[in-house]
Amino acid sequence: MPEEQTFVKRLAFKFVRKRIAGATLNSALETTKELNSRGMSSTITFLNDHVRDGIKARYNLNSYLQLTKQVSRLNLKSGISVRLSQLGFNISEGMANKGLEDLLSVAHKSGVHAWLEHESAVDTGSLLDAYSSYHETFPNTGIELPLRSSHIAEIVRGLPRRGSLLKLTAHSYGYSKGKARDPVELYTSYARKLGKSNSVYILENDEKTLYAAASRAGIPKSNLIVELPLGCSSKWLKRFAKRRLSMGVYVPYGKDWVPYAINRLTEGRIRSIAMSVLNGETSGSYAR
């Protein structure tokens, strides 16, 4: 279905063109420089997920190592966000763990926060195991928590109690089925549980939801960082600045932007239809 796939990609690009820094590492670094000049930090992620062999996993690892070293060399206020699948988790857990340890070691030596990002290709238990394995050795490692997962309570209970870097996000993969709770309610509930002895980030696409959650969080401002995706409204950025909140921006870069556009910037039926088309399913399978 090349025509339909092309249409979906064009449609997705309308959503994403202001939300990605560009195709190259330099574009992400320049974007971060500009954000830093405005008093905001960033979290940079590389949009390259389709790992089918060890060569591609090594390429992704080298890309992240280069990113981390450049962030440190340029003294940028930025972290990195990596998905285990990018390091070959679904080929070999041993390969992914070795790559992750190499990356976290460099990030630790460079003073750069490294986030383990939640994704559909890796189960949450494995992500939590990886975080628990490296948290003490590399304390600048953080984990993204899928706020709407049906297992969020169990995940929270399994976290180290103090000194963790935690990122709450409702815009992640693997939403729980059934009636969804109000995201503001969820953000504030878990921010209060986690934020008195840990640094808590809230990553949210919707500025109004994020503002409400930050206003109700009920934890010290020094422990709370609000994060919006690149391309967010300047009007809302000013509102956050007036409240003297620590601000961060999620900065993706790379050529493989279509999965990001669909999984992070769309929801519900639009997401289902777009994914079906890109996966080459017939019209009947996604029109139901």
Image (tube, grey):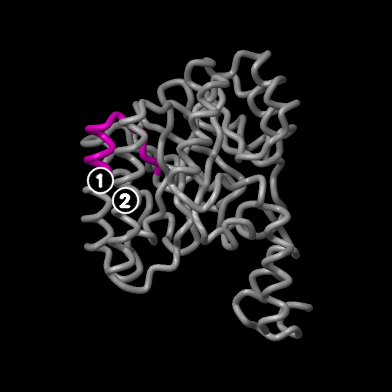
Q: Is residue 90 above or below residue 228?
A: below
Foreground residue among 172 and 48: 48
Quarter of the image with the C terminus is: bottom right
Q: Residue furthest right?
A: 288
Question: Residue 174's x, y, as percent?
Answer: 56, 58
What's the mark number on residue 129?
2
Question: Residue 126's x, y, as percent?
Answer: 35, 56
* Residue 109 horizontal side relative to residue 71, left or right: left
Q: Is residue 154 visible?
A: yes
Quarter of the image with the N terminus is: bottom right
* Residue 259 horizontal side relative to residue 94, left or right: right
- Magenta region: which residues? 103-115
What's the residue type where badge 2 is placed?
Asp
* Residue 262 horizontal side relative to residue 146, left or right: right
Q: Is residue 281 above or below residue 80?
A: below
- Please identify the quarter of the rendering in which residue 281 is found: bottom right
- Please identify the quarter of the rendering in which residue 124 is found: bottom left
Q: Is residue 92 above or below residue 288?
A: above
Q: Is residue 162 visible?
A: no
Q: Main secondary structure of the magenta part?
A: helix
Disc 2 and disc 1 in contact, CB within 8 angstroms: yes
Q: Residue at x 68, y 73 (%)?
A: 6
Q: Is 272 part of what is drawn in magenta?
A: no
Q: Residue at x 38, y 43 (%)?
A: 158
What's the mark number on residue 96?
none
What's the mark number on residue 133?
1
What's the residue type where badge 1 is placed?
Ser
* Residue 157 horizontal side relative to residue 261, left or right: left
Where disc 2 sits, the SS reads helix
